[in-house]
Amino acid sequence: MIIELEQTGTLEGLKAVLEHVTQQPEVRGLQILASVNNPWPAAEVDALLKELTLPVFGGMFTGVIYEGQVYDPGTIIVGLPQAPTVRVIKGLDDPTTDFRAALEAAFGSECVGKTIITYVDCTASQIEAFLAVLFNHCGSDRKYIGGGAGALDFVPRPYLMTNDGLVQGAAVLALTDMTCSIGVSHGWRPLAGPYRITESEGHVVKTLNGRPAFEVYREVVEAHAKKSFDDMPFYDLSKFYPFLLGRVGAEGVVRDPVTNNPDGSLLCVGDMPVNSLVDIVTGTPRWMIQAATKAATIATKDFQSERAGGMTLLIECISRSLCLGEDLPRELEAVRILDLPQVGALTIGEIASTKKYCLEFYNKTTVVGILAS
């Protein structure tokens, strides 16, 4: 695998690295991980992507990770030794989209490849609905890894990178025969609950145990934090107190509340299904780093093939990194795997399958993947 970091985030830098990587005879496909803050003209990047003859996939994220450090701006180009089958599924921002028909049109009745790298537009409302159909269509005998591209302002823009240029409201899928093992862990621990979600709509939780969601949430968080939401922006405090959706036999799935609405509801990153049980959880840097180390250990233990020529793909939640603050480099170092280059992105939502044979859209979670030919 050919991996190069471009630190300026400029169009000229991107062109130079792309030219160098694509000239290597062993490169059959391209993965591009870029910062949303790269100072490049979107129209010119769009045109450049359309000119590429190799299959390309990737996206723009809140930061990119290379060998234990975050770069913003910056771009990582990964030259793959196998040609991936790349497809774009549009309509993730439209609740009427028939994802089964879209996947049939993209892949036919049977998906090919051992591993599906999946990047989605984080602003799309139908991510979980799409992932459920994807899992049913392509099956549990494949590994899935990826995350949400986008910026922290949650403004819809073309964040995904494909041979069709920059696209939005979509998912880009790269099917490959690379072997993959995945470790997933978050480290958040229950503070209060469980509460039943008694009313919700998509990403918005309206009531918990029949009471306005923010009313319940505020009581718990302010009592524990000894701080008031009246004295600070909502997310400055809420980022340390996510929800946790219960999962039988697993850690559970974290949901990040990002906005307090005037009607007393809470907007989260990810679906909050009615009748689900949720805890309000909290964490410390030590717990989070321990969990990230666990994810790397699981990925290493489960990888059964030859690792030479492979890489670690780290999908790290931007919200998690904001909570870690100056401890983030310790977490990135904790998940470094000996003899493997580390690349990754700070995502808004993490995508992974586990050995429990489920596909989830996570928040505030570390996903460590080992990929090799």
Image (cartoon, helix red, strand yellow):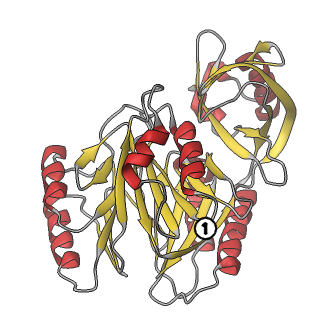
Front residue of 201/193: it is 201
Residue that sits furthest to the top in the current view: 263
Residue that sits furthest to the right in the current view: 193
Q: Is residue 63 above or below residue 216?
A: below
> Residue 226 falls in which quadrant of the image?
top right
- Amino acid carrying label 1: it is Arg
Q: Is residue 186 visible?
A: yes
Q: Badge 1: few (under 14), some or many (20 or more) residues near its Cα, within 10 Å? A: some
Q: Residue at x 54, y 60 (%)?
A: 145
Residue that sits furthest to the front in the current view: 109
> Residue 225 falls in which quadrant of the image?
top right
Front residue of 321/185: it is 185
Q: Residue at x 55, y 66 (%)?
A: 329
Front residue of 161/244: it is 161
Residue 268 position within the rendered picture, expressed as x and y whole percent measured from the top left: 60, 31
Residue 142 position within the rendered picture, expressed as x and y whole percent measured from the top left: 58, 65
Q: Is residue 356 above or below residue 309?
A: above
Q: Residue at x 74, y 22 (%)?
A: 218
Q: Is residue 65 visible?
A: no
Front residue of 314/113: it is 113
Along the horizontal axis of the image, is 371 left or right of 282? left
Along the horizontal axis of the image, is 136 left or right of 167? right
Along the horizontal axis of the image, is 206 left or right of 100? right
Q: Is residue 194 above or below residue 84?
A: above
Q: Residue at x 41, y 33 (%)?
A: 153
Residue 90 position within the rendered picture, expressed as x and y whole percent measured from the top left: 36, 39
Could you tell me which secondary element the residue under label 1 belongs to?
Answer: helix
Residue on which disc 1 sits: 330
Residue 275 position within the rendered picture, expressed as x and y whole percent measured from the top left: 79, 26
Along the horizontal axis of the image, is 37 left or right of 326? left
Q: Disc count in the image?
A: 1
| Quadrant containing the N terminus in the rendered view | bottom left
